Structure formats: structure tokens, C-alpha cells
Image (cartoon, helix red, strand yellow):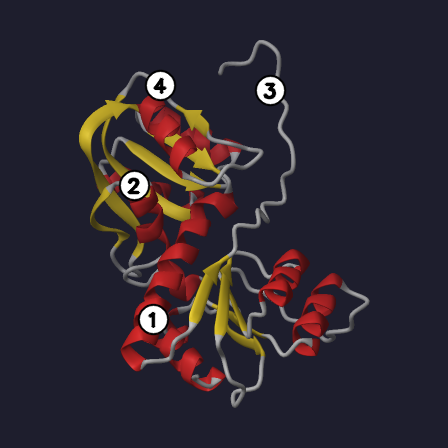
Amino acid sequence: MPRLSEVIAALDALWPPERAEQWDAVGTVCGDPDADVGRVLFAVDPVQEIADEAIALGADLVVTHHPLYLRGTTTVAASHFKGRVVHTLIKHDIALHVAHTNADTADPGVSDALAGALDLRVTGPLVAENNLGRICELDQPETLGDFAARAAKRLPATAQGIRVAGDPEMTVRRVAVSGGSGDSLFDAVRAAGVDAFLTADLRHHPVSEATQHSPLGLVDAAHWATEWPWCEQAAAQLDEISDRHGWDLRVHVSKTVTDPWSAHHHSPGAPN
């Protein structure tokens, strides 16, 4: 059975912390480097539901994509919900490790997992300078409406579902994808000359400007849904490392939906 320090070293080799953005907070949040690790749980969000799931599973390590303390803190008191997560994990000898923007720009990274979930063929990065996002091709052309339906079927179900901007009958052959918030990438998307862009957290003004600029199809999924496929990819990578080293780790992926939106009501008369 490996020590936590050995597992963390393997994870850092997959997603080097120095590749994280300067504003990011990646790495180990809590955990004893000398503790044994036999079971690992991957999840998107380090929230209480995931901590409770880790306890029920008997996990020794939780690996999340999103940081617990992105903007820093001066306290881990359990009177605050983030402090309560830390207390819960430490009381049960569970470590927490974060791979965020260093996993976004990895190869394979978050956007590779998103492309894989939709059976898209990756042809290169969307932003070559930092390996962010992916440009992909479909095996066969399809309409924007069908491509959005593909995303709705292949990605985890959320209250938001899938939103579409653009002519649903337009033909889609090449697409860009980026897990998580992607409306800062519109310049790169236009430069790539793709037919559609799949991402999350798209805002009104950037979308309005993007669709007015050119006939670009936009497919907006829930942030959590676009990043959850990375958990399965990351778990498979750790499984492979475990087999290579003879660690016999038991690696799990949480299916708990931690997307914060809980319901959706379709407006009468609105487009389907």
C-alpha cells in the first residue's frame, strides 16, 4: 500500500502544479504524507456531500478538480462550511488534493475528457500557448441541434440541461470544446474557424457579440457537467499508475451531482 506522499507525487506528475494559473490554489489541502492510501475518490467539488461520501466509502484520499480555498482563508473553523469539510476529512484521516487549472492544461486534460465523452476526435489545442481547450472533428456532419442533443445525452444530467445559441439547422463539422467557463475564449474560437463551441457558464453579452460576429453555434452546458468526465479520465490514469507500481489502489469516481442548480422550469411558449 503506498503512502500519501507517493500517490501525490504520481498525481503531480500527471498535473504539474507549476502549470496552474497564478491565481489558482492547487495541491494538497490536508493529509499526512506518511499515511497509507488504499482507496481514492475523485470528484469535481470539495463539498460536504463528497466528504460524507468519502467516509461512507472508506476512502483515504479525495481528489477534486475545484479548489476548497481558492481565495485563501485565515481560518478553518468548523463554524464555516469550508472549515467543516476540513474538520470532517481530518477526523476520518482522509486527505484532500486539488488539480484545477493544471488539469485543464494537461495532456490529456479536462477538455480531452469532455471531447471523449462526446465521441469527438481531437485534432489539437484551442489555445496552443497554454494547451487550453481542444479543437475536434465529428465523424459525420450533423446539425447544431443534433450536436446539442448529443451533448445532452452524453454528459451527466443537470437541472440546466443544454442551451443553444445559433441556427439549430446549421451544419456542424468542426467544434471547439472547453471544460468549465469558456466565454473568455471566443477570440481563439473564431480564429480556429470552427462551426460550434461547447463549453459552460456562457454570459449574455459575450454570446450576443459572438453570434452577431459570425454564424457560430454555441452549446452551453452546466459547468459541473463539462468537468465531471475528467474524474473518470483521472481515475483511469491513477489506476494505470497503481497497476504499474503494484499499489493495488481502489479508485472510485463520485456520481453525486454537486451542480448547485437544483431545478429548471421551461417558460411557456419558449423555444424547445
CA separation in Å, label 1 and label 4: 38 Å
| 3D distance between C-alphas at marks 3 and 4 | 18 Å
Dividing the picture into quadrants, the one containing residue 193 is: top left
- Residue at image mark 1: 14
Question: Callout 1, which amino acid?
Answer: Leu
Q: Which residue is mark 2?
A: 176
Amino acid carrying label 4: it is Pro
Residue carrying label 3: 266
Type of the residue with mark 2: Ala
Q: Is the residue under label 4 in contact with that under label 3 (CB below 8 Å)?
A: no
What residue does disc 4 label? Answer: 168
Count neighbours of disc 1 (C-alpha within 10 A) and say few if under 14, some if 14 to 19, many if 20 or more: some
- Residue 23 visible at all: no
Q: Position of residue 26 (x, y in %)?
A: 50, 71
Q: At 44% from the left edge and 32% from the top edge, which residue is drawn?
A: 207
Residue at the spot x=63%, y=23% of the render? 265
| CA neighbours of label 2 inside 10 A, class few (<14), some (14 to 19), many (20+) | many
Of the numbered discs 2 and 3, the one sitting upstream in the chain is: 2
Callout in the foreground (2, 1): 1
Which is nearer the N-term, disc 2 or disc 1? 1
Q: Is residue 48 left or right of residue 181?
A: right
- SS of the residue under disc 3: loop
